[in-house]
Image (tube, rainbow, N blue to C red):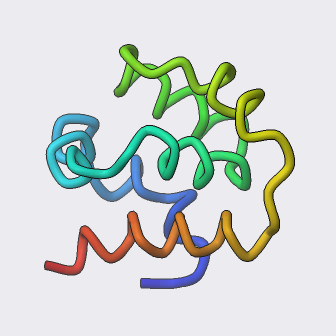
């Protein structure tokens, strides 16, 4: 996968497949990955995981390092390489 594939997940997979693939990831890890994502991707994940209040998670975490965001995105992407 290319480095920007996190932004393209919803172009490659449908919401049900994404939810199923990353079902075991913590809401904190998912929220962290979304900190580096576009507003569109944030909206799509919000629609796919309505039970997670991503805004509250972001506020709770505060600032995170870019490296942490990239690691969270890569962890999610690795779940699609199975």
User: Is residue 21 left or right of 43 when viewed as pictured?
Assistant: left
Q: Where is 70 relative to 20, above or below?
A: below
Q: Where is 30 relative to 75, above or below?
A: above
> Farthest residue in the right direction?
63
Q: Where is 49 relative to 36, above or below?
A: above
Figure label count:
0
| The N terminus sits in image quarter | bottom left
Q: Where does residue 20 sit, x and y in percent of width and height? A: 15, 44
> Farthest residue in the front direction?
60
Residue at 58% of width from left, 54% of height from top? 33
Q: Where does residue 68 sit, x and y in percent of width and height? A: 67, 69
Residue at 82% of width from left, 40% of height from top? 62
Residue at 43% of width from left, 38% of height from top? 27
User: Is residue 80 left or right of 9 when viewed as pictured?
Assistant: left
Q: Quadrant of residue 51?
A: top left
> Farthest residue in the bottom direction?
2
Q: Where does residue 5 sit, x and y in percent of width and height? A: 50, 70
User: Is residue 64 left or right of 49 when viewed as pictured?
Assistant: right
User: Is residue 31 left or right of 47 when viewed as pictured?
Assistant: right
Q: Where does residue 36 sit, x and y in percent of width and height? A: 73, 55
Frontmost residue, 61 versus 67 = 61
Residue at 22% of width from left, 80% of height from top? 81
Frontmost residue, 63 versus 5 = 63
| The C terminus sits in image quarter | bottom left
Q: Where is 66 relative to 38, above or below?
A: below
């Amino acid at each position: 996968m290319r480095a920007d594939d996190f932004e393209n997940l919803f172009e490659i997979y449908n919401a049900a497949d994404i939810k199923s693939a990353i079902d075991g990831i913590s809401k904190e890890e998912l929220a962290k990955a979304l900190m580096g994502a576009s507003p569109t991707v944030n909206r799509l994940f919000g629609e796919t995981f309505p039970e997670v209040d991503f805004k509250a998670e972001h506020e709770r975490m505060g600032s995170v390092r870019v490296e942490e965001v990239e690691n969270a995105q890569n962890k999610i992407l690795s779940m699609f390489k199975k």
